[in-house]
Image (spheres, helix red, strand yellow):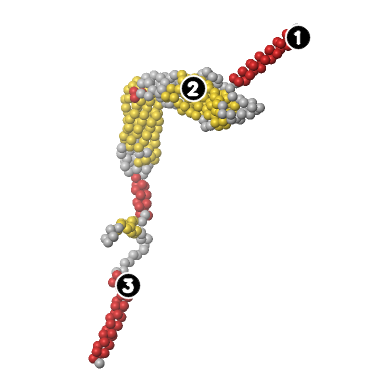
Amino acid sequence: MVKISLRVFLLSFIVFVFLAGIAYAATPRLSFSDVDVKVGSKTSKNLNDGDTIDDEAEPGDTVEFRVEVKNNFTDAEDLDIEDISIEITIEEVDDGDDLDEESSDFDLKAGRDKKVTLKFQLPIEIDEDTFDVTIHAEGEDENGTDHDADMRLRLEVEKENHLLKITRKTLSPAEVSCNRKNVQVGVTAINIGSEDEEDVTFHVLNSDFGIDLKDDVGDLDAEPNEDESRFSKVYTFNVPSDAEAGSYPIILRALYDNDRKKAEETVTLTVSDCATLKKETTESTTEEDEEVAVITPTTGRTTTTVVEETPAGATVTQESFLKSNAFVTGIIIAEVVAVIVGIVLVISLFRRRG
């Protein structure tokens, strides 16, 4: 009986060691220890492989993934995993294309973990659907062995039934003064809801200038990334000549769903006082030195002569060359030379006669 019990014990011990070895070998050395996902302002925590993210996303939402990865080598093994990177992909979410982000590389010592945050901006034009999300981490230990970890999640996108959004608003010029004609406002409105819209109208408004422009847009489809789902136009208006200097809001408004809903944005036009602007320009020009280009006939080269401004109250006098000191000095020298020449001639004449 004792011999049988000993055999059973030894056999059980061998099986235990074998199974423990298999379990140890199967333990991933790189794993995800925690995954949280923030959609908009709400966070889903402690997600596992295959989970659906708790909160639905909307068009244009920010989706933030906080992924914690761990090196599962023990302190006794003391193996670092190096050059670890985490890549996250939201599949086919951008008009059939993927969105993906990748972290910078980092190292992990045995038993340590690190949290990485990656953010995505969902497209404004997006299908109402459920999208697969893949999270992949990989690195290499000090012995050159590769390690990786993978997780899949699902992201649901929900859209409001009726929703228009103004995605473009431009104003040119944004500031006017004397010339107040042909101010242009560019707009684009898109149907980002799940329902087609009928009888959409678009308005450009400002009560100070008497601006009330209207377009009967008609239908805007709910199909993302199609021309039929958007409205774009450039409007032109003039600013009254008697408009006072100041800042004026130009309202851009789309009405839809039987005028029960609106999408609205504002651009600001700055009007400067024309007289003040002219005065500032004149003063600026007066303060500058005037530059005059002079062509030298002999060389054909262009030189620049700076004519400095005469200070107020100063008297400018110009002296002719005939009255200048140089001219007088020249005459005196010529007279001295003439006298000397005369004396020399007289002396020469007397010598010949003698």
Q: Position of residue 280 (x, y in %)?
A: 37, 49
Label 3 amino acid?
Ala
Which circle marks residue 326 in the picture?
3
Tag 1 or tag 2, which sits nearer the N-term? 1
Q: CA distance from mark 2 to mark 1?
A: 59 Å
Q: Which residue is mark 2?
A: 133
Rendered position, 214 above or below 342: above
In front of the other: 15 or 320:
15
Q: Position of residue 156 (x, y in %)?
A: 47, 20
Rendered position, 291 above or below 342: above
Q: Are marks 3 and 1 in contact (CB under 8 Å)?
A: no
Label 2 amino acid?
Val
Tag 1 or tag 3, which sits nearer the N-term? 1
Q: Residues within 10 Å of mark 3 (few under 14, many from 20)?
A: few
Q: Are marks 2 and 3 in contact (CB under 8 Å)?
A: no
Question: For numbered disc 1, what is the local secondary structure?
Answer: helix
Judged left or right of residue 13, residue 35 is left
Q: Comparing marks 2 and 1, which lies closer to the viewer?
A: 1
In front of the other: 243 or 249:
249
Q: At 47% from the left edge and 23% from the top edge, which residue is drawn?
A: 90
Instruction: Look at the image and tell me whether residue 163 can be seen.
Output: no
Q: Residues within 10 Å of mark 2 (few under 14, many from 20)?
A: many
Q: Position of residue 153 (x, y in %)?
A: 51, 20
Label 1 amino acid?
Val
Which circle marks residue 2 in the picture?
1
Q: From the image, which quarter does the N terminus lie in?
A: top right
Question: For numbered disc 3, what is the local secondary structure?
Answer: helix
Judged left or right of residue 83, residue 260 is left
